[in-house]
Amino acid sequence: MDSQDLRYFVAVAQTLNITKAAEQLFITRQALSKAILEFEKKCGSELFLRNNGKLQLTARGRELLEKSIPIVDLFNDLEKSVNASSRSQKSKIRIAIGLGTLNALSPQVFAHFKSDHPEIELSVKEVCDDEVRKYLETEEADIGILNSTPEKIKNYDYRLVQDGKICLQISKKDPLSAKDLITPEDMHLQPLVSLGERCDMHSVLMEKCHQVNSFPNLVLETIDSNVANNMVYDNMAISLFIQSKTQAASPAVRIIPLALGDTPWGTYVISRKGFDHTHSTRLLIDYLENCAC
């Protein structure tokens, strides 16, 4: 249990409305509902009765609310005092983000964070996945953000902020476009345009293919998405699709997920092992997780 648990609980208990409380807390309704359920598990008892979407405090909930309000008030006062004393010293977070990962989250996410937290300066650099790791190792970045899988980032501390899929961009002229799921076997000898081994998505695709003796034909490595898109539109190649929150730019193209078996995939925040996160970096990571819910 921490101060955020109590703050979320008090907001919901006082409004008895998840939507209103979420608006007050500037998080999504889904994220708050999940947090309250987790908090009840920590407490070992139900704090709310739920009936047709209406909330009512249980006896345990009323008891906990009475004890929690002064604690939350004290914490809020302390936070205001700390913020006031540090306002003149703007903190900075240096972020290295993998190519395409920003699109998977939302291109506006950092702008919204800056608007909500003007006391925190963000320095964001978009680079290839392998460079994200280099920036962390050389301490040129505080955190990295990648579309990846735990196996690829096991040498780092990491936190999942959004589940995802590896998808392929395929021309509707290609017979594979009729499928709803692409298997590694389907990729055998298929022309492929990609970022290459510098990209975790490409590495996982190749590993999955090679496990079943399937060998895509990598015809071009490029970081220019326009080149890759044009090759797909002209049915010259298949490409990896990293803009997971958008649709295909052309009606002549389909976006189809790749079968990954039991391999998890998503957007992760990574940092050096044992990195001592500041209040600002923790705030940003929580923000990214809540925005992605």
Image (cartoon, rainbow, N blue to C red):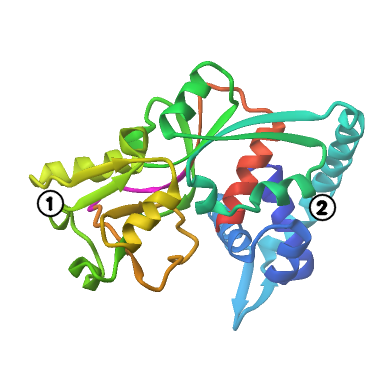
Which span is picked out in magenta?
Answer: 261-267
What's under tag 1, amino acid-wise? His
Instruction: Locate the C terminus by quadrant.
Output: bottom right
Task: Write down the residue under mark 1.
Answer: 188
Instruction: Locate the N terminus by quadrant.
Output: top right
Q: Residue furthest left?
A: 213
In the image, what residue occupies the spot 60% across and 48% down?
Answer: 288
Instruction: Name the spot of residue 121 as percent of width and height, x first.
Output: 75, 34
In the image, what residue occupies the spot 53% across and 54% down?
Answer: 41
Quick check: 207 left or right of 43?
left
* Disc 2 versus disc 1: nearer the observer: 1
Q: What element carries label 2?
A: helix
Instruction: Name the spot of residue 71 as percent of width and height, x first.
Output: 80, 44
Q: Can residue 168 be seen in this view?
A: no
Task: Write down the residue under mark 2.
Answer: 69
Instruction: Name the spot of residue 209 as percent of width and height, x first.
Output: 16, 46
- The answer to whether residue 116 is above or below residue 58 is above
Question: Which is more N-terminal, label 1 or label 2?
Answer: 2
